[in-house]
Image (spheres, rainbow, N blue to C red):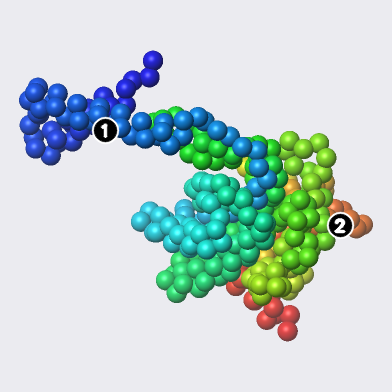
Amino acid sequence: MKEDPSKEAVRRLQALILRETGAPLNPSTNAEMASIVQSACGAVGEQIREAEPERSFVQREVTILLADLRGFTAITATLPAGAVIPLLNRCLGRMNEIVSRHQGVIDKFMGDSIMVLFGVPDKRPDDVQRALACAVEMQLAMVEINNQDHQEGMPELSMGIGINTGNVTAGKIGSDFYSEYTVIGNEVNLTSRIEAFSLRGQILISEPTFDRCRDFITVSEAMEVFVKGKAQSVRLRELYAIPSLNLEVPRMRKETRHSRRLEVRLPCSFRLIQNKVVMPKIYSATIRDIGYFGVLMETDQLLKAYDDIKLEFDLPLVDFKASDIYGKVVELEHDKSGHLAGIEFTSISHETNMKLQLYVQLLVMASE
């Protein structure tokens, strides 16, 4: 049987008074305090029951936005403990402002991720449009945040965003002691899978989301991916712009897609990542070209589109071993030498990123 929460509150108050005064309360004062706490708990419980006599749930179409800071765990490993929380709070605080302006509802913060709902508890005809505008402004805000952090010597942050629209179950989950309004269902899980496919600075949307606003946005061609829990492939599109609102994704995504690549032959090794776990088996490969945001890799191992990998290779001109680069397979080719995989970096530490940029710059100067 669950213990009355008022008793735990009394014990905590007793411990607090003892710690601050150095003396325990006498029995009669203890009894009076217990009565006050029990009355207060009873009043709060009654207010909750009056406000919501039944646990009601509704089925509703909702647009779900899930955003995640890419490589934040690796970045924080290089920072002093006192800098991590202010950095995260500054970023998520800015996201909170944007969500509020677009009338979204923050469902929860999950470490360095944020889940936002459009369509609950109040449904509006422009829920999808507001969700998409919110996503673009979030990515634009990341540029502002990075400009400020760069002046303070902080590492660059990047965010991946996934958006999906579908029917969910919405309502309060929990007990009288603690509850929260949230949504559950397959569409929530699918949003999480879509977000996992998104790259740095990228916004990916599902086909149902696209169907509800195809004349409102500019997007890429559809890409077919397979996600856990779905027997059939899922169609995704990358959001580029919202012309009517004069909103466009930051230049970083454009630079990533069109950045200069330089031919090299660098031995490298990689490991596959499955369910966010780095597998122990090491594969050998050769980097055929390299840029600020990715590499073209030749390998005997047959990779699949959107496989996640962890890379390791030496940068000879700068005498540095890059051992903390994570990437995603975004393109596959085949030639007479073997399998070629285009890798876009999804996470890279500040130090490695600086060394990589210096290495590429030296290659550029040597080629001119």
Depth check: give the residue in front, 161 or 128. Answer: 128
Q: CA distance from mark 2 to mark 1?
A: 68 Å
Drawn side of residue 115 relative to residue 226, left or right: left
Depth check: give the residue in front, 335 or 320. Answer: 335
Drawn side of residue 144 relative to residue 333, left or right: left
Q: Residue at horizontal 9%, vertical 37%?
A: 21
Q: Tag 1 or tag 2, which sits nearer the N-term? A: 1
Q: Is residue 226 visible?
A: yes
Q: Is residue 58 above or below residue 350?
A: above
- The quarter of the rendered structure image containing the N terminus is top left
Name the residue beneath numbered marker 1: 40
Q: Secondary structure at mark 2?
A: strand
Report x, y in % for residue 190.
69, 43
Report x, y in % for residue 18.
13, 33
Q: Is residue 262 visible?
A: no
Name the residue beneath numbered marker 2: 333
Q: Residue at horizontal 83%, vertical 40%?
A: 232
Look at label 1 and name its amino acid: Ala
Q: Secondary structure at mark 1?
A: helix
Q: Is residue 353 above or below residue 52?
A: below
Quadrant location of residue 29?
Answer: top left
